[in-house]
Image: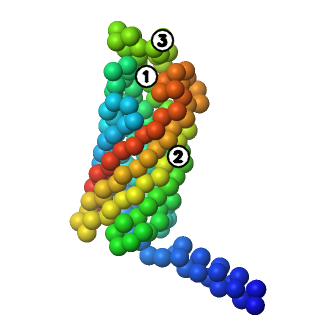
Amino acid sequence: MKITTLFAALFLFVTASLSAQEISEHALGLRLGDSDGFGAEISYQKSIGSSNRAEFDLGWRDSRDFDAFKLTGVYQWVRPLDGNFNWYYGVGGGLGSVNFDEGNGSFYGDNDGVFVFAAGDIGVEYNFDIPLLISLDFRPEIGLIGYDGFDNDFNFDIALGIRYQF
């Protein structure tokens, strides 16, 4: 009886993992938002298999205390929710360059330069019947190299994404 239950549970898990979903081969658009100030990123997604993809973002962040450019890469697993809704999660990292504005009384000091970070990603997306994808995600980032004081070495990046699929 235990073996039958184990095989039934395994069968249900495998069939749930193989459920049909549509991930576009390519998606290009914008990712807007940030935890502190304003951030805009040009975002590109490339499918890898039927339920995985890579996302690359080239972005700019602006706040009262600093300006930064960053390049982020995230590997994502995409799972269906209901209808055209999917949820996804992933891991990755990136690098960037920051310039602090000491004229505004910044407490960051003289830490301008290059930084490297690790990132996670979790979000929900809606895939319209037209080639449009809209998403809301949360990307926590933790500084690894050169982050001295930048966003206190940890950044809660929340953003709205809109992408054209092709």
Q: Which residue is mark 2?
A: 120
Q: Position of residue 158 (x, y in %)?
A: 39, 43
Along the line of sight, the residue nearer the viewer: 126 or 76? 126
Disc 1/disc 2 C-alpha distance (Å): 21 Å
SS for tag 3? loop
SS for tag 2? strand
Q: Quadrant for the N terminus, please.
A: bottom right
Q: Position of residue 89 (x, y in %)?
A: 50, 55
Query: Residue 98 shows which numbered tag?
Result: 1
Q: Position of residue 50 (x, y in %)?
A: 47, 68
Whichever of labels 1 and 2 marks the residue nearer the N terminus, that label is: 1
Query: Residue 109 shows which numbered tag?
Result: 3
Q: Residues within 10 Å of mark 1 (few under 14, many from 20)?
A: many
SS for tag 1? strand
Whichever of labels 2 and 3 marks the residue nearer the N terminus, that label is: 3
82 w.r.t. 60: above or below:
below
Q: Residue at x 44, y 24 (%)?
A: 97
For the residues labelled 2 and 3, say whether their Cβ atoms are less than 8 Å apart: no
Whether residue 94 is visible here, answered yes or no, is no
